[in-house]
Amino acid sequence: IEAGIYAKSRFIVRRLSHEEKQKSLLAYLKTGDYQVDKTIIFVKNELELNELIAICRRHSINFISLNSYDSVEGQICDKSEEIWKQSDENMLKVVLATDKAMVSYRLKNAQVIVHYTLPDKWTIFSKRFAASHGSYKNYLEKLSPSIPKAIIMLDENNVMEIPRMISF
């Protein structure tokens, strides 16, 4: 998180009902920005991942889903570039990932991280930002990548996490 703050990343925090959160995410995906900017949507568990998969399928959004069943337990895979290259006609697919998958896949260079749901532990929330490693501005280089963006979506299920977000 600190790297994102020092790199002047854009942080967008939205407080919405669960239904509004789905509509807001869908509106973002329909802009097509995910086809240009490497985008990861993090959820905390498989149930929420399945919910997002259904939304993407229903609205013809190109996606790749990563869950804890996609990898061998304890084996860390650096499949970042392989995942981003699974695109058609130079258009990227949005990556949907659980927190458990984040441990197995070392995703990096994401320009947009959407925290659709918050994890139970603050350390996991912080580790999600590692997916933007490589996208943060390097002040020693003249040409740097675009400014990464983090979208944090809060709903009525985040009663316990909201005080922590406010102090953040």
Image (spheres, rainbow, N blue to C red):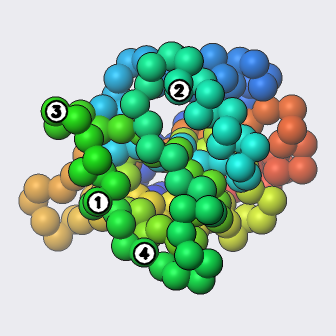
Which residue in the structure is indicated by mark 1? Answer: 82
Please name the residue shown 75% across and 43% down the image.
47
Which residue in the structure is indicated by mark 3? Answer: 89
Which residue in the structure is indicated by mark 2? Answer: 56
Which circle's residue, 3 or 1, is located before the other in the chain?
1
Which circle's residue, 1 or 2, is located before the other in the chain?
2
**Residue 60 in the image: x percent, y percent?**
45, 19
Which circle's residue, 2 or 4, is located before the other in the chain?
2
Q: Secondary structure at mark 3?
A: loop
Q: Callout 2: 10 Å neighbours few (<14), some, many (20+)?
A: some
Q: Secondary structure at mark 1?
A: helix
Q: Secondary structure at mark 4?
A: loop
**Residue 46 in the image: x percent, y percent?**
71, 49
Can residue 59 be seen here?
yes
Can residue 37 be seen here?
no
* Three-letter code for the amino acid on which mark 3 is drawn: Glu
Which residue in the structure is indicated by mark 4? Answer: 77
Give the quarter of the figure containing the N terminus: bottom right
Foreground: 82 or 152? 82
